[in-house]
Amino acid sequence: MNDLLPGQSALWQYFESTVQALMKRYGYAEIRTPIVEQTALFARSIGEVTDIVEKEMYTFEDRNGDSLTLRPEGTASCVRAAMEHGLLHNQTQRLWYQGPMFRHERPQKGRYRQFHQVGLEAFGLEGPDIDAEVIMLSARLWKELGLIEHVTLELNSLGSNEARAAYRDKLVAYFEQHRDQLDEDSLRRLSSNPLRILDSKNPDMAAMLADAPRLMDHLDDASREHFEGLTALLEAAGIDYVINPRLVRGLDYYCRTVFEWTTTALGSQGTVCAGGRYDGLVEQLGGKPTPAVGFAMGIERLILLLETLELVPEAALGELDLYVLPMDDVATAQAMLLAERVRSELPALRLQLHCGGGSFKSRIKKADKSGARLALLLGEYELAQGRVTLKFLREERDQLNLTQDALAKTLADLVGSEHA
């Protein structure tokens, strides 16, 4: 687990505000759920024999003896809340969320035991059109962040539960024939979750896995039609994709469409967004049958990707535009009032007022250290004349002396029209 320091928070705010604006444009409403839930919720939804439930969850008993768990992912909590508050009764819902998740797994670059996700869930829609829109939304996010050339969309279909069960039998029979090539994890999964073996990254098993039966070849007709409808919509939208027959996802609740956005920009191939369809989960948790699709993306991994590719816009760094500097204590009160006036006239301007007194030399040093582009100086002369002095801290330019009434327009012209 790690701290998010002031030097990093501006970039997070840039990412989060970009996501929030995009979700609004697609008609998704935000939902906020507790970070602690009943352990049974995750065991029933994610699957008892998944790595998350078996090894990674932070689970404890409260004072009443109830087993509680810090949420390891957002979908189960979102489904629980939607059911509990009647949001799924004869209606569709498009919901999104963001916040911390918790898994006790091996820390690595861009991954922590407390990590943060953005996710969305769409309920009550069963056609491939909503699958396509969810993917299109994520593609638009990559475009707006400048990442679209650095990510690849991988698709697969897991079919219906019945088709997957029949395929599972064929897969187990194949793996039994090659039992001597399976590693310890795969042998453990052979009886509990054999589809997860397909997702193994063990290079010694690569050739054997490449020859394994393909789930795509054993789809039921309805799932095949659904997948063909999805790919047709993506092609019409100009979204490139790769069909990955080994893409199965690690959670038990997925069916039909599954997808991942992956990148190689962080070294070995890594997933930055993943999701799919989970039509049986609401019923599994005690509700009425409800089709659903969604995705989640790890914020830490995406922030690291933006930094690695140097795609962080200057405006996202949160640097100050203006440092208001009373040149002595006599000017402090007037400088404070002037700073408030500027904040009212230019609400998007990033402005900091010098506080704490000190010599003029120390005040100038603090102005420079603030990182602001401009310093507004207010001293005895300026007070007497009703004027201010603007000093350029990052450019070789002559300072400006102007009336207080002309200040807002000059600042808007200097800093940019977005602050006007």
Image (spheres, rainbow, N blue to C red):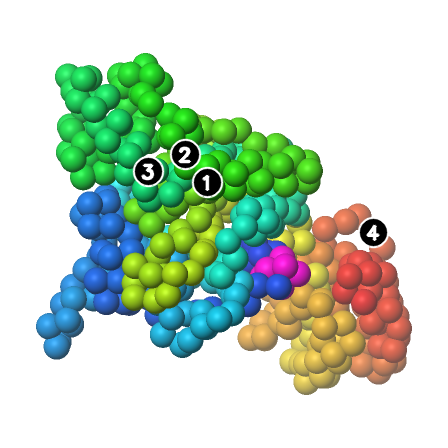
Element on which disc 4 rests: loop
Coordinates of residue 259 in the picture (x, y in percent): 47, 40
Q: Which circle, 4 or 2, is nearer the viewer?
A: 2
Q: Amino acid at mark 3?
A: Arg
Counting residues from the start of the chain, the first of labels 2 and 3 encountered is 3
Q: Amino acid at mark 1?
A: Ser
Where, quadrant-wise, is the C terminus in this rendering?
Answer: bottom right
Q: Residues within 10 Å of mark 1 (few under 14, many from 20)?
A: many
Q: Which residue is mark 1?
A: 223
Q: Earlier in the sequence, mark 3 or mark 4?
A: 3
**Residue 113 vertical placement versus 165 (above, below):** below
Q: Residue visible at 72% across and 73% down?
A: 347
Which stretch is magenta?
Answer: 20-26
Assess whether mark 1 and mark 2 are in contact (beta carbons under 8 angstroms).
Answer: yes
Residue 159, percent across and down?
40, 39
Res. 397 mark: 4
Q: CA distance from mark 3 to mark 1?
A: 11 Å
Q: Looking at numbered disc 2 in the image, what kind of residue is underneath it?
A: Leu
